[in-house]
Amino acid sequence: MPGAAPAAGTPPAGSHVFQVRALPATHSAALLTEPVRQLLGSLHRQFNARRLQLLAAREARQRQFDGGVLPDFLAETAAVRADQCWRVGSVPTELLDRRVEITGPVDRKMIINALNAPVQAFMADFEDSTAPTWDNLIRGQINLRDAINRTIDYVDPSSGKRYTLNERTAILMVRPRGWHLPEKHVLIDGEAMSGALFDFAVYLATNHEALRRRGSGPYFYLPKLESHLEARLWNEVFLAAQAQLGLPAGTIKATVLIETLPAAFEMEEILYELREHIVGLNCGRWDYIFSFIKKLRSRSDSVLPDRASVTMDCHFLRSYVALLIQTCHRRGAHAMGGMAAQIPIRSDARANDAAMARVLADKRREVAAGHDGTWVAHPGLAAVAYQAFDSAHAPNQLHVMRDEVQVTAADLLRIPVGTITEAGLRHNIRVGLQYLAAWLEGSGCVPLYDLMEDAATAEICRAQLWQWIRHGARSSDGAEITAARVDQSIAEELDAVRRSVGAQRFAAGAYSTAARLFAYMVTNDEFDEFLTLPAYEYLP
């Protein structure tokens, strides 16, 4: 990949060599201003080594799980859980009502539509909904800057329709990438920096003054944490960034997604570490199911059935939800519900009615459990979500303490009963192939089979296939699921995709590359921690 030459000469003490190794992207020079570069360099130098140490700690913990150790609540932090006195810091007034939030990628039209949607907040997603091409990242940051300054507009090239912001817009929140993802396009002192720190620092340095002028603040969603020590790192990043930019401590507010199995055992500790900055936890259900498979992958007694049957009614997921709500409310934090991945089905009224009924039932379950708000993937689902959450007759349910909840480690680890079907196997392959192909082409959020699929749901698909092969699972017809069987099914499904999209579109797309990469990941002896890590090498 062509890149800019490093700055000439020896940098002065305390400075850093900042190098962008990427093809030119619109406005990248204007975006990566000197204050932005200074914050990027400072955060990298202070925190990247610890980030890498924490990633190594993840690997060590996984080796323990592979050796037969099960996740459990930490003995060394029992005092934090037992102390009834501490609570999280103040919650901004505009975040007291979070009944319905919408999420999506950072492309220009999506940002306008999401901010105009009839919801409380929009989470602009640099993580699972955005393929991290350099162009996507730079344009996404520019789009958010323009949205905050209310200069954003978009003209659809096919229809000529112009999109602009309404006078009233949703509150903006931003999800940077997880700790595990590098940003290969930016080198600090010759070392690739963290994708999480890049997304966070560029957004904060660019927009904190404009957000303050608008009476809002820098609000973040933090993904894929696996321990309270990783939360501690984020807290120290927040403190350092606020100090460098002259912001009062506690200006940054964050919601943490509890979407990994280890984090479910450290919810209270995560709140404690971030207590000056945190306002809530979120049930990231799809990533959580993926993490459940990933962390217990070596156990033959922990094989999950078809993805479609692993619903929120399963005991291990009900327990995780109950514990999250109880933990949040006892500490004064919001407990956010999970994503409704359905999208309106405009071509079939009956199927659309059935889909909306499923969304309503799911959101009513969240209200009954005590959640304070929820996520939707499409503006068309907002009214359905409000129908459920308005029944609580309050902007939140912080008063619902769930004192009756007694969740044990065994509750969080109970394996759901169900079957593996040929249809479920094929569905995993179809979704995995098509999502990965779209991701390699630069799209991180893809409508497939009336659901909005992102990296989290694609991860479930490939993790289940790997797990079924690894442990010689059998489908409901009695046939063993082998690597050869899955390879044959991938070839057949790839041929079906070719017929569906047409030979010209298939040849121009990334389908063949996606099929090779997907087949390798599901049949390889070793399990790739995230499909986006090997796939990232294919992105420009």
Image (tube, grey):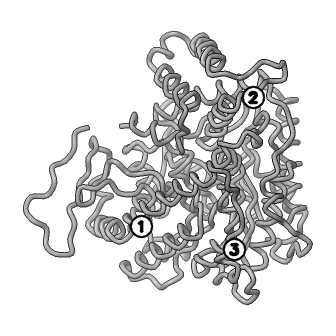
* Label 2 Cα neighbours within 10 Å, binned few <14 / some 14-19 / many ≥20: many
Residue tagged by mark 1? 50
x, y percentage for residue 441?
46, 31
The amino acid on which the numbered mark 2 sits, given as a three-letter code, is Ala
Q: Earlier in the sequence, mark 1 or mark 3?
A: 1
Q: CA distance from mark 2 to mark 3?
A: 36 Å
Residue tagged by mark 2? 473
Q: Secondary structure at mark 3?
A: helix
User: Quick one: quadrant of the N terminus?
Assistant: top left
Do the CB atoms of the residues marked 2 and 3 lie less than 8 Å apart? no
Do the CB atoms of the residues marked 1 and 3 lie less than 8 Å apart? no
User: Quick one: quadrant of the C terminus?
Assistant: top left
Tell me what residue is drawn at x 54 percent, y 28 percent: 518
The amino acid on which the numbered mark 3 sits, given as a three-letter code, is Glu
* Label 3 Cα neighbours within 10 Å, binned few <14 / some 14-19 / many ≥20: many
Q: Nearer the viewer, residue 313 or 395?
A: 313
Tell me if I can see residue 437 in this picture: no
x, y percentage for residue 472?
71, 28
* Label 1 Cα neighbours within 10 Å, binned few <14 / some 14-19 / many ≥20: some
x, y percentage for residue 92?
64, 78
Q: Nearer the viewer, residue 103 or 302?
A: 302
- Name the image quarter holding residue 121: bottom right
Tell me what residue is drawn at x 63 percent, y 32 percent: 466
Q: Which numbered marker is on residue 268?
A: 3
